[in-house]
Image (cartoon, rainbow, N blue to C red):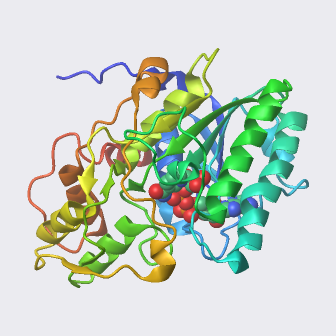
Amino acid sequence: MIQPRHTPFEAYRGRRAVVTGGLGFIGSNLSLALRAHGAQVVVIDSLVHGCGGSPANLKEFAPEIHVELADIADSDRVPEHLLGADVIFNLASEISHSADPADASRDLELNVCSQLAFLRLCAQHAPRRRVVYTSTRQVYGPPRYLPVDERHPVEPVDFNGVHKHAAAQYHLLMTRLGSIDAVILNLTNVYGPRMALGVPGQGFLAHFLAHALKGHSLRVFGDGRQTRDPLFVEDAVDAILLAGLASLSEHRLFNIGNPEAWSLGQIAELVSEAAHLPPPRLCPFPENRRIIDIGSYSTDTRLAHSVLGWQAATRLPEGIRRTLQFYGRQTFGEVSPKASRYAAVGAHDQSA
Ligand SMILES: NC(=O)c1ccc[n+]([C@@H]2O[C@H](COP(=O)([O-])OP(=O)(O)OC[C@H]3O[C@@H](n4cnc5c(N)ncnc54)[C@H](O)[C@@H]3O)[C@@H](O)[C@H]2O)c1
């Protein structure tokens, strides 16, 4: 019989983890992985309207993962969960990108004001604890060179990028002040099971997948040649888990993406093929999207690899197939034996 291989994640067994934004796409996958690795998990999420959170993301595991429906800034309900926490994963966020100043206040409230209040609660009730904060590649703006490393200038093209950068800087400042012990991960586009396909503003991959699942053929803005390096959510979760454990000295900010970049046209073709749809069509860029488009992007992951020991493991065609399979509209052929490892562990957990 094959024995499960030793992973660094066994260190989470018995540990108490707080996951903010844990009802959302990445946060729910992270919470399930932590639970599968034997951690005690508390989720703090206020199910902000327009974000990707849903109680359905964790409903099968409801008795095992405590969910506190609260804003992360709630000084009455959050502190009791921070007391005794060994590690804090701070994923609560608005992720929608907009260049419209009318949307900036909401983004400021969610991504900066709530974050600052939360960090003050962390400093008070979980001093010097590891806090992993998920920021975004969007902070870099249009890349001046590829692949983008951690020294790339920060020049966001939208309010979300400015606010995510500000929140990351608050984490780093409070680390320098000795209040918390933060790690920042600048994530590229993440996709996979539990992404909020029905919610607008969740990025091009959610848009492609949602359309494909409805049987609609895909359209690609522009010439379709801009590159992206989409990351399967299990790989993003692995990076977050490693960041929660890493001993750090010099570096506290890591770019997390897929070493393999694809053009948007190729990605649309992959999704269309997997969903048995006609080939995608090109169409002109709408002006409100063109001004916040960053052109091509790919991630330099060498630092994350050398310091965190992380690298992506899932190639895009397999990730897309597994994502479409999760949403269950079609049978997309054989799934690799590694597939759905969290679902499998979850099933085991339930029967235990
Ligand atoms: N999804 C991606 O492709 C991507 C890319 C780069 C970075 N990120 C980052 O990863 C993190 C998770 O993203 P996601 O895709 O899972 O988003 P999501 O919208 O699916 O989940 C975010 C969750 O945070 C909750 N939330 C927001 N503000 C809150 C507050 N003040 N108090 C309590 N809960 C709050 C929402 O209710 C939601 O459930 C975010 O920090 C995001 O910026 C995501």
Residue 304 in view here: yes
Looking at the rendered image, the quarter that the N terminus falls into is top left
Q: Nearer the viewer, residue 19 or 201?
A: 201
At x 37%, y 38%, the residue is: 147
Task: Left or right? Give the position of 338 relative to 342.
Answer: left
Looking at the rendered image, the quarter that the C terminus falls into is top left
Task: Left or right? Give the position of 268 relative to 164.
Answer: left
State which quadrant residue 22 falls in: bottom right
Place of residue 303 in the rendered image (x, y in percent of width and height, measured from the top left): 46, 24
State which quadrant residue 54 falls in: bottom right
Task: Left or right? Give the position of 122 relative to 216.
Answer: right
Place of residue 218 in the rendered image (x, y in percent of width and height, measured from the top left): 24, 79
Task: Left or right? Give the position of 195 relative to 163.
Answer: left
Residue 61 in view here: no
Q: Which image quarter has ligand 1? A: bottom right
Place of residue 29 in the rendered image (x, y in percent of width and height, measured from the top left): 47, 50
At x 65%, y 76%, the residue is: 49
Q: Is residue 160 above or below residue 79?
A: below
At x 69%, y 43%, the residue is: 168
Q: Furthest-front residue in view? A: 144
State which quadrant residue 110 falls in: bottom right
Q: Is residue 321 above or below residue 250?
A: below
Q: Nearer the viewer, residue 301 or 91?
A: 301
Q: Is residue 351 above or below residue 300?
A: below
- How many marks on residues? 0
Place of residue 339 in the rendered image (x, y in percent of width and height, measured from the top left): 24, 46
